[in-house]
């Protein structure tokens, strides 16, 4: 329902998962909130993609944060849904194995059944290295718990205490994934399997931050990976329903054109329909570059902040193929989530992607976990491969490349799509293709993390950033934490105490 009101306590620009979380939690705490989303549906990267009557997850494969909340701070997604009284609107189920990593001569299914399950699944292929895998995951767990406790806006004394209070984060602040794994004496094959999920984080081991990978891995191992039955659009819809239940107004199909700034403070926003909404607080869930350059206007930011936004590097794009395939063409050993590489050298795979060759893909088959997500007798399949961020058009023979990359685990796929050396475009009525990105906000390299990235506050009074362009970073669980952090900054300590720093 659209109100005629034009004054609110808070305007949220963008209905991605971070924005929805912030809107819902603030509304629950009695703030008068309006969320404006430019697309017809909320969710951003979590919104579904419809093709031929089938509903695909546009981007997402799996999430962490789906378990019941514990004193250790896990289960953050469930925690937020529970706070908003909509936990029953979205069923998160565990994916096991978490993922399968396939190389030309190595095929490893990695378990998410706790630390022991994870170590055992790796030790099956790399016997005698149990202690090293356990030591790695222990270190990653420390990194993860330190990252959760890290103060949102550390004062001077807290900054000075970082080496003592956050020793793992401090020690690894400049460490890449490759350097981090080198410490444990793994052989090249074990390193390739451990690092295989770099494909989700958008940078190869030589450039990806070890704490980013370590935090994700520890969270996956300790808590497991989850799929949202019916697709992740249900999670976005549940957050929307929760926000509305607590009094927030959510308006889709409404783009924020301008964030109004006067005398160094936000005053509200103007939409593409020329509506003005006045508010002393605006939370932008939109690309930070657009927020600064186009929506608020660079002239309102100090030079050092403008330079930071200009110099930070965005993450990579992906090209995604969506298809439905007869179930009998899918091998019986196929799992929900597989990463397939033509070589164990991830840096070479990444370089190939930058050069326009889709070397290394993710193959996601949600109907393995959720058979009701597609028509009977079919599997829904999503294949994603990386493309450079400056190549936003679909590469010419993307269908052939994606199908051939996935063929080691789905040999019938190229034939089903009608692709091969002779026919790059295949049967166009059997698939949909699109590019998506930047997949993760900023690149997750050591030189762009923590204080070197963008925080949740800005130099403009009342203007906050939430989502994957701000702290603590990218990924569903992480942007939900970002929404919680912004609430904490606005409301004070009582929000999510004990869960985030
Ligand atoms: C291909 C791909 C695969 C991924 N896989 C995973 C995964 O498996 N697991 C995982 O945890 N994470 C994954 N991620 C990352 C995750 O999806 C994102 O980090 C997260 O969803 C980003 O949420 P956000 O809150 O930053 O908002 P976004 O999803 O970026 O949404 C921003 C919203 O703002 C809206 N908007 C933009 N401009 C305006 C405007 N002017 N006015 C109003 N609204 C506006 C947009 O329409 C959008 O709805 C993946 C991402 C991609 C792209």
Image: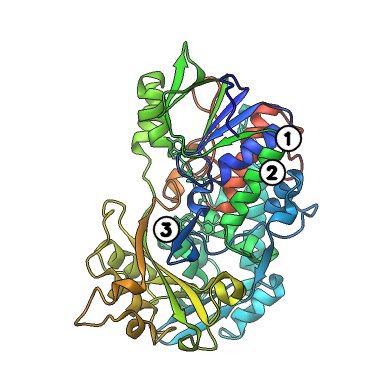
Q: Which residue is mark 2?
A: 242
Q: Is mark 1 within 8 Å of ligand 1?
A: no
* Closer to the eye: label 2 or 3: 2
- Answer above or below: position of 464 versus 38: above
Residue situated in front as seen by the camera: 215 or 326? 326
What residue appears at the point 21 percent right and 82 percent down from the top-left corner? Answer: 421
Badge 2 local density, few (<14 within 10 Å), some, or many (20+)? many
SS type, badge 1: helix
Secondary element at image label 2: helix
Q: State yes or no: discs 2 and 1 in contact (Cβ < 8 Å).
A: yes
Residue placed under numbered mark 1 in the picture? 28
Left or right, 308 with respect to 37, comes to left
Q: Residue at x 77, y 58 (%)?
A: 68
What x and y, as percent, mark residue 171?
A: 56, 50
Please report whichever mark, 2 or 1, sits nearer to the chain's N-terminal start: 1
Q: Is residue 80 left or right of residue 359?
A: right
Residue tagged by mark 3? 202
Q: Position of residue 390 (x, y in %)?
A: 27, 51
Q: Tell whether 116 sits left or right of 177.
A: right
Q: Which mark is residue 395?
A: none
Can residue 58 be seen in the rendering of this structure? no
Local packing at callout 3 (Cα closer than 10 Å; few below 14, some 14-19, many 20+) is many
Image quarter in which the C terminus is found: top right
């Amino acid at each position: 329902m659209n109100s005629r009101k034009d004054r609110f306590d808070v305007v949220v620009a963008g209905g991605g998962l971070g924005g929805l979380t912030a809107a819902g939690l603030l509304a629950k705490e009695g703030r008068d909130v309006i969320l404006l989303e430019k697309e017809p549906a909320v969710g951003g990267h979590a919104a579904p993609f419809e093709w031929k009557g089938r509903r695909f997850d546009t981007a997402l494969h799996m999430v962490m944060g789906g378990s019941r909340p514990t004193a250790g701070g896990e289960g953050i997604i469930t925690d937020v849904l529970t706070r908003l009284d909509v936990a029953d609107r979205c069923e998160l189920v565990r994916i096991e194995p978490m993922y399968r990593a396939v190389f030309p001569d190595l095929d490893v299914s990695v378990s998410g059944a706790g630390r022991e399950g994870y170590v055992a699944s790796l030790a099956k292929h790399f016997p005698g290295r149990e202690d090293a895998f356990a030591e790695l995951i222990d270190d990653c767990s420390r990194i993860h718990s330190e990252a959760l406790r890290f103060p949102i806006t550390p004062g001077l004394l807290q900054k000075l205490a970082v080496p003592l209070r956050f020793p793992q984060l401090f020690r690894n602040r400049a460490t890449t994934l490759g350097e981090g794994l080198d410490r444990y004496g793994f052989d090249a094959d074990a390193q390739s399997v451990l690092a295989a999920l770099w494909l989700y984080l958008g940078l190869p081991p030589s450039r990806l931050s070890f704490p980013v990978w370590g935090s994700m891995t520890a969270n996956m191992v300790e808590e497991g990976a989850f799929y949202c039955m019916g697709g992740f659009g249900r999670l976005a819809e549940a957050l929307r329903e929760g926000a509305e239940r607590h009094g927030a107004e959510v308006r889709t199909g409404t783009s924020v054109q301008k964030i109004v700034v006067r005398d160094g403070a936000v005053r509200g926003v103007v939409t593409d329909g020329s509506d003005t909404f006045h508010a002393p607080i605006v939370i932008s869930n939109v690309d930070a570059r657009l927020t600064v350059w186009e929506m608020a206007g660079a002239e309102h930011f100090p030079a050092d902040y403008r330079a930071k936004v200009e110099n930070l590097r965005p993450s990579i794009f992906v090209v995604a193929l969506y298809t439905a395939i007869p179930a009998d063409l899918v091998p019986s050993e196929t799992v929900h989530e597989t990463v397939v590489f033509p070589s164990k050298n991830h840096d070479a795979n990444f370089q190939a992607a930058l050069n326009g060759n889709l070397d290394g893909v993710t193959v996601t088959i949600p109907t393995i976990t959720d058979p009701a997500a597609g028509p009977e007798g079919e599997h829904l399949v999503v294949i994603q491969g990386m493309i450079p961020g400056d190549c936003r058009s679909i590469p010419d023979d993307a269908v052939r490349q994606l199908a051939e990359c996935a063929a080691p685990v789905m040999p019938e796929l190229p034939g089903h799509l009608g692709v091969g050396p002779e026919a790059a475009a295949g049967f166009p009525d059997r698939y949909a293709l699109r590019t998506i990105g930047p997949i993760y906000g900023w690149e997750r390299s050591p030189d762009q993390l923590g204080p070197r990235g963008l925080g949740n506050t800005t130099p403009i009074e009342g203007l906050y950033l939430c989502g994957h362009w701000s702290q603590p970073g990218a990924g569903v669980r992480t942007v939900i934490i970002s929404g919680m952090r912004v609430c904490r900054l606005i409301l004070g300590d009582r929000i999510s105490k004990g869960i985030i720093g």
